[in-house]
Amino acid sequence: MTQARPHRTQVVAHRGASEEAPEHTLAAYRKAIEDGADALECDVRLTADGHLVCVHDRRVNRTSNGRGAVSALELADLAALDFGSRKSRDFWRTRDEEPDWEFRPEDREDTSVLTLERLLELVADAGRPVDLAIETKHPTRWAGQVEERLLVLLKRFGLDAPAPAADSTVRVMSFSARSLHRVRAASPTLPTVYLMQFVSPRLRDGRLPAGVRIAGPSIRIVRNQPAYIERLKQAGHQVHVWTVNEPEDVDLCVGLGVDAIITNRPRAVLRQLGR
Ligand code: G3P
Ligand code: CA
């Protein structure tokens, strides 16, 4: 078992409470903690000067008032930007189009770039256990540096191995099996989640890459291949599904006994689950 606490469907705030506050900002994560989310999801990328920051896209264009690739900018460059100035659900929307909806002013506080270190501090000060699901983005480009930096940071916070039942705990997620392998090689007991946009033919029988115990299928896989989810469960794996925002999808996931629902709307999902 990779999860020490009693089983119940975890509600994981995807990029924070990202439907109510700008994604990957302190404001979004504070809101998720206030809302009662069991865990926080974040994406991490390396800056040009080697800091891990919580940014989803390769470039900052969609989510800030700046331009350029995270990997080409230093932390000080990113710190000068406002990551709450824009909002778009649409991943591909260009910066010259109007945002498709606006945040309330009170949800736009603390919208400077969020370092992973600051997020770990927030979790440490949460006053209750809050798990963290950290996704390594495009780790192949950095040949192991993302994982290396990540593990140094986790170690500093005492989070590089599963925590006792009452503590916050961390898992590392990736679409890259190689990235997860690197994490396990450095920290063998740290839980890892293999994210899937589709089910590759060699994994259809419910196997996961060697050493991985948690599957991270998209909600589309769950809708279209519920028998595959059952196979994963039968094989003894946990299943963490992303990104689950519609009430009927929450019901589907609960019915299939998934272990974690990753959502932009933690408050609504908790309410639906009667919590
Ligand atoms: O939680 C996994 C999910 O976040 C993967 O997709 O594009 O939102 O990072 P993406
Ligand atoms: Ca992610």
Image (cartoon, rainbow, N blue to C red):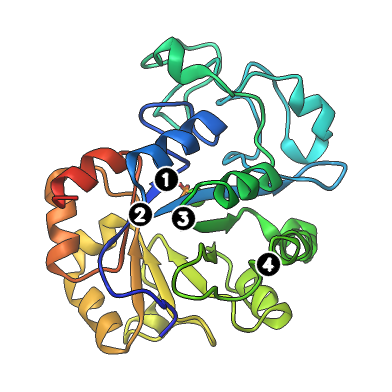
Q: CA distance from mark 1 to mark 4?
A: 23 Å
At numbered mark 4, what does the secondary structure look like: helix, strand or loop? loop
Q: Is mark 1 within 8 Å of ligand 1?
A: yes
In the displayed structure, 72 sits above or below 46; it is above
In the displayed structure, 1 sits above or below 216; it is below
Ranked by sequence position, the earlier of labels 3 and 4 is 3
What numbered label is drawn on residue 130? 3
Ranked by sequence position, the earlier of labels 3 and 1 is 1
Q: Picture coordinates of residue 25 (x, y %)?
A: 55, 32
Residue pointed to by mark 1: 14
At numbered mark 3, what does the secondary structure look like: helix, strand or loop? loop
Answer yes or no: do the residues labelled 2 and 1 have beta carbons within 8 Å? yes
In the displayed structure, 233 sits above or below 115; it is below
Ranked by sequence position, the earlier of labels 2 and 1 is 1
Residue type (three-letter) at the residue carrying disc 3: Val
Q: Residues within 10 Å of mark 1 (few under 14, many from 20)?
A: many
At numbered mark 2, what does the secondary structure look like: helix, strand or loop? loop
Task: Choose mark 2 or mark 1, whichever is in front.
Answer: 1
Q: Is residue 224 left or right of residue 143?
A: left
Q: Could you tell me if residue 73 is visible in this image?
A: no
Task: Choose mark 1 or mark 4, whichever is in front.
Answer: 4
